């Protein structure tokens, strides 16, 4: 009889409450768990389907008290059809090519990452990241991960997207692009590229993380249609009613200072 060692239990922890980075006046709290080998890919797949996201070797999901503003969203690529504006993005970037490269940080990527952060998120924590911090973000992964580099006809790096490979699709972890090319909508191009690549791989979904209707930075994800959202533990289609009545999906704001607090 073959001996099987007992399976290591999976521990989950909650983080300290902090100000929400997406919706002013709310607090953020996450449930986190470590993704470790063996079985990291399988665990990550299950957690992704349950609405978790990955950072380094940690998976996390929001458990903010009194708030459900962050809604997991994914694109079923078989039925996706680009909108008129998305077709214009493809046309405007006809000379930009995407290349899959290993998840290895390069000085060229980091220079672009720094310019993007300083232009778009100068007040955020990521704006102060060193090259070693960036390298950890890209390379500290227990699962199959790669970077998509977007280059113009002169071979200049204009965008990048850190991407995870799942059993049922691709997951966009983090993307950044040349800030002076904002009008080219390279973030949208990256998602359209992922959709096309996922189809080529005969996989069903592109995972986009969280749709946050109250956040300008995160509300755009609902523009990729059709999409599916995870509510009450079940994936279902995002409907026109959801888009028109987005606020009912979100509970009322939670004050940063609890009632009676200083």
Image: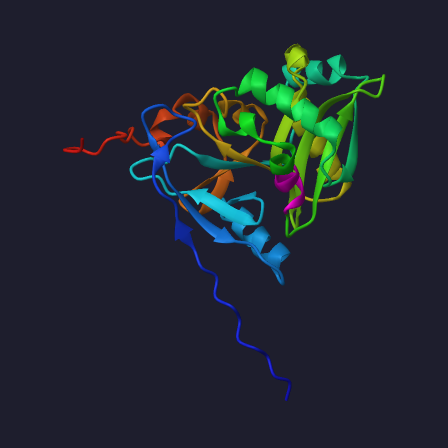
The residue drawn where x is 39% and y is 45% is 15
Relative to 195, 34 lies left or right: left
Q: Is residue 157 left or right of 229 when viewed as pictured?
A: right
Q: In this view, does 160 lie to the left or right of 31?
A: right
User: Residue 104 in the image: x percent, y percent?
Assistant: 73, 40
Q: Looking at this rendering, what residue extends furthest in the bottom direction?
A: 1
The part of the chain drawn in magenta is 135-140
Q: In which quarter of the image is the C terminus?
A: top left
Residue 115, horizontal then vertical, whole percent: 64, 19
Residue 55 is covered by the magenta coloring: no
Q: Please tell me which residue lies in front, 176 or 218.
A: 176
Choose top left, top right, bottom left or bottom right for residue 19.
top left
Give x and y (percent) for residue 253.
Answer: 29, 28
Q: Which residue is rendered at x = 38% and y = 24% of the image?
A: 245
The magenta stretch spans residue 138: yes
- Residue 34 position, x and y percent, is 52, 54
The quarter of the image holding the N terminus is bottom right
User: Is most of the magenta stretch helix, strand or loop?
Assistant: helix
In this rendering, the answer to whether 135 lies above or below 88 is below
Q: Is residue 196 above or below residue 203?
A: above
All told, the count of numbered labels is 0
């Amino acid at each position: 009889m073959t001996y099987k060692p007992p399976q290591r239990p999976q521990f989950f922890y909650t983080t300290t409450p902090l100000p929400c980075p997406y919706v002013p006046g709310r607090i953020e709290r996450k449930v986190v768990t470590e993704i470790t080998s063996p079985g990291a890919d399988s665990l990550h797949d299950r957690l992704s389907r349950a609405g978790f996201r990955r950072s380094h070797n940690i998976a996390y999901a929001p458990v903010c008290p009194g708030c459900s503003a962050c809604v997991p969203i994914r694109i079923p690529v078989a039925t996706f059809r680009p909108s008129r504006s998305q077709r214009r993005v493809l046309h405007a970037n006809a000379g930009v090519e995407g290349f899959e490269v290993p998840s290895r940080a390069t000085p060229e990527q980091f220079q672009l990452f720094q310019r993007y952060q300083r232009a778009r998120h100068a007040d955020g924590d990521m704006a102060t990241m060193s090259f070693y911090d960036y390298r950890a973000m890209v390379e500290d992964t227990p699962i199959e991960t790669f970077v998509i580099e977007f280059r113009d006809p002169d071979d200049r790096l204009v965008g990048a997207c850190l991407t995870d490979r799942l059993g049922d699709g691709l997951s966009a972890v983090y993307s950044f692009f040349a800030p002076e090319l904002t009008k080219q909508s390279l973030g949208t191009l990256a998602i359209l590229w992922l959709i096309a690549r996922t189809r080529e791989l005969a996989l069903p979904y592109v995972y986009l993380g969280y749709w946050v209707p109250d956040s300008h930075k995160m509300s755009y994800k609902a523009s990729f249609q059709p999409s599916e959202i995870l509510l009450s533990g079940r994936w279902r289609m995002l409907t026109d009613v959801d888009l028109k009545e987005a606020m009912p999906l979100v509970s009322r704001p939670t004050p940063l200072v609890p009632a009676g607090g200083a």
